[in-house]
Image (cartoon, rainbow, N blue to C red):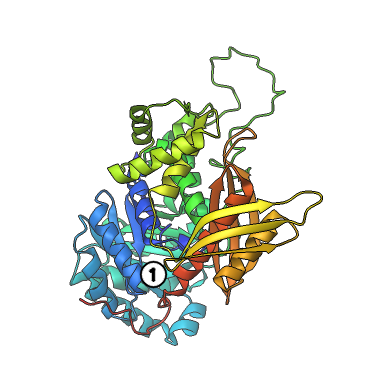
């Protein structure tokens, strides 16, 4: 049985999803959850890009000790490696990840260099990286549109320079499993010995083949695969970790492949990413979609009900999906609440735990039963917070079939309390227009989505919005039993994400422009 390394790039490549802006607190929270999931390699970010990325990778390197912690550094700028080492030096297992374009299209567009010049740049980058750490991963961008012989020569050169992992990237998502098999077979024949380094695969899902291509690479000898939770990423996303991992788990004995992931953490991790990113999922999404384990009620039960149904190929509880759901009643004690929060995988300080318990009691006054999903929302909303510019203090809305909908809103903006009122075509419209007037900005609302967190008319409602302002997009989310209040919370969250993202002047990965320079 061959063990496969899972390289999670949700925090770097996954954050390229439209509208996704994660704060440092959210990224650190996700990194700790990925540690619980037991991923082998965690790509924390691109520290030379901005102050936010620098501080975020530094915190993750200090606070997350289980997986290998990787930082991206550009081959085109040697200063990136010095900056990356400053944030990685406290990590238990540090790794550099650097790259060059492999295809003529990418090479000519971004580097303006030929194949030989690009190879020399790659070798120099690996040699620079090796001055800081022994573990260096090298990626060949757009590998599957590149000349295969040029790929072989580039791979040989960076291995000789000291690269320990070679990653082939289907950057534009155009490869087929046959393309992957052919390139890996050529590498196995012409790079000797093939197993002196770990070969890896990084796929995008433009043609819906990311998981299939990744599996093809693993069957041809790759030992590592790049994934993101829920498959989030630029355009149509990346290889979905949960899908690939469950293919391997379901067919482990036949494929001879396995991972070291804690599968019971798959669903909690998926749900966390969904909530902090604001990216929803289709109900029919494999493994973690709402319908993934819902079978037609008319399917005849021909066997003993205690047996596994013949149509069920995976056990939902294996993934951390409990269809009945753990429940707390409004009378639950502090001890019961604290114990359940711990069982859900949260390690909160006394102050945050106390604030979450108060939120639980407030919710319990409105609901008869509190589900795990409710508790997770409370924890993620109350315990993992950043300093924000806008805070919602008060909302009162009047609407009906006769009166003109109006909203009275009280906000805290830059520490100052302000209040105003306004009208609209409905309660949500009145609320949004009033808030826009108060904050003196009116981003375009390009998405508005409402979901019930649990069943019942008293369920928490989760509202997700996507705002667009000056070509920048941000997702915001809010939760409450009152949908209008949840909508206001989502708008405020989205405005804060726009504010946060607007302060980050990030360096683009495919350039040689100056790095962000922290005080080293």
Relative vertical location of residue 176 with respect to residue 75 in this rendering, above or below: above
Quadrant location of the N terminus in the rendered image: top left
Relative vertical location of residue 13 with respect to residue 275 in this rendering, above or below: below
Using residue 454 as the reference point, say whether residue 331 is left or right of it: left
The residue shown at (61%, 70%) is 437
Residue 265, given in percent of the width and then of the height, sits at 41, 39
Picture quadrant of residue 178 = bottom right
| Residue farthest along the top direction in this orientation | 304
Which of the pair 330/49 is nearer the observer?
330
Picture quadrant of residue 481 = top right
Using the rendered image of the protein, determine whether residue 256 is visible from the camera's viewpoint.
no
| Residue farthest along the right direction in this orientation | 402
Relative vertical location of residue 363 with respect to residue 503 in this rendering, above or below: above
Crowdedness of circle 1 by 10 Å Cα count: few (<14), some, many (20+)?
some
The residue shown at (56%, 56%) is 490
Quadrant location of the C terminus in the rendered image: bottom left
Which of the pair 367/520 is nearer the observer?
367
Which of the pair 180/18 is nearer the observer?
18
User: Which residue bears the numbered disc 1?
Assistant: 152
Residue 401, given in percent of the width and then of the height, sits at 81, 49
Using residue 188 as the reference point, say whether residue 142 is left or right of it: right
Residue 219, given in percent of the width and then of the height, sits at 44, 48
Which of the pair 449/274 is nearer the observer?
449
Residue 205, given in percent of the width and then of the height, sits at 56, 58
The residue shown at (50%, 50%) is 275
Using residue 31 as the reference point, say whether residue 440 is left or right of it: right
């Amino acid at each position: 049985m061959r063990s496969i390394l899972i390289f999670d790039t949700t925090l770097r490549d996954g954050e390229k999803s439209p509208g996704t802006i994660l704060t440092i607190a959210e990224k650190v929270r996700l990194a700790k959850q990925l540690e619980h999931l037991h991923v082998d390699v965690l790509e924390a970010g691109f520290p030379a890009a901005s102050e936010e990325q620098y501080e975020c990778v530094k915190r993750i390197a200090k606070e997350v000790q289980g997986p290998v912690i990787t930082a991206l550094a550009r081959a085109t700028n040697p200063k990136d490696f010095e900056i990356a080492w400053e944030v990685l030096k406290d990590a238990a297992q540090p790794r550099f990840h650097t790259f060059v374009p492999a295809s003529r299209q990418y090479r000519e567009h971004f580097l303006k260099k030929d194949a030989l010049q690009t190879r020399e740049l790659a070798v120099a980058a690996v040699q620079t990286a090796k001055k800081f750490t022994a573990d260096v991963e090298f990626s060949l961008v757009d590998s599957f549109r590149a000349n295969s012989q040029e790929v072989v020569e580039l791979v040989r050169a960076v291995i000789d320079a000291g690269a320990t992992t070679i990653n082939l990237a289907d950057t534009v998502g155009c490869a087929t499993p046959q393309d992957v098999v052919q390139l890996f077979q050529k590498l196995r024949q012409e790079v000797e010995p093939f197993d002196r380094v770990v070969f890896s695969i990084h796929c995008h899902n433009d043609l819906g083949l990311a998981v299939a291509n990744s599996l093809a690479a693993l069957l041809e000898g790759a030992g590592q695969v790049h994934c993101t939770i829920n498959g989030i990423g630029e355009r149509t996303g990346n290889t979905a970790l949960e899908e690939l991992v469950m293919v391997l788990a379901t067919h482990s004995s036949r494929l001879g492949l396995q991972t070291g992931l804690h599968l019971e953490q798959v669903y909690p991790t998926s749900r966390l990413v969904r909530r902090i990113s604001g990216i929803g999922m289709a109900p029919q999404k494999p493994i973690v979609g709402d319908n993934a384990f819902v079978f037609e009620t008319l399917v005849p039960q021909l066997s003993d009900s205690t047996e596994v149904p013949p149509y069920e190929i995976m056990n939902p509880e294996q993934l951390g999906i409990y269809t009945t759901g753990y429940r707390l009643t409004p009378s639950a004690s502090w001890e019961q609440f604290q114990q359940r929060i711990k069982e859900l995988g949260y390690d909160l300080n006394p102050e945050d735990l106390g604030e979450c318990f108060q939120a639980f009691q407030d919710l319990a006054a409105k609901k008869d039963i509190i589900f795990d999903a409710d508790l997770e929302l409370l924890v993620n909303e109350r315990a993992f917070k950043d300093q924000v510019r806008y805070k919602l203090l008060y909302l009162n809305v009047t609407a009906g079939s006769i009166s003109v909908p109006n909203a009275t809103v009280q906000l805290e903006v830059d520490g100052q309390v302000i209040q105003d009122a306004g009208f609209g075509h409905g309660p949500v419209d009145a609320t949004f227009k009033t808030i826009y007037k108060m904050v003196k900005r009116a981003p375009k609302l390009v998405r508005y989505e409402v979901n019930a967190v649990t069943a019942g008319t008293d369920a928490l409602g989760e509202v997700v919005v996507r705002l667009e302002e000056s070509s920048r997009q941000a997702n915001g989310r809010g939760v409450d039993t009152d949908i209008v209040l949840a909508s206001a919370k989502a708008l405020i969250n989205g405005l804060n994400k726009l504010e946060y993202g607007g302060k980050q002047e990030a360096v683009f990965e495919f350039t040689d422009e100056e790095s962000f320079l922290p005080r080293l």
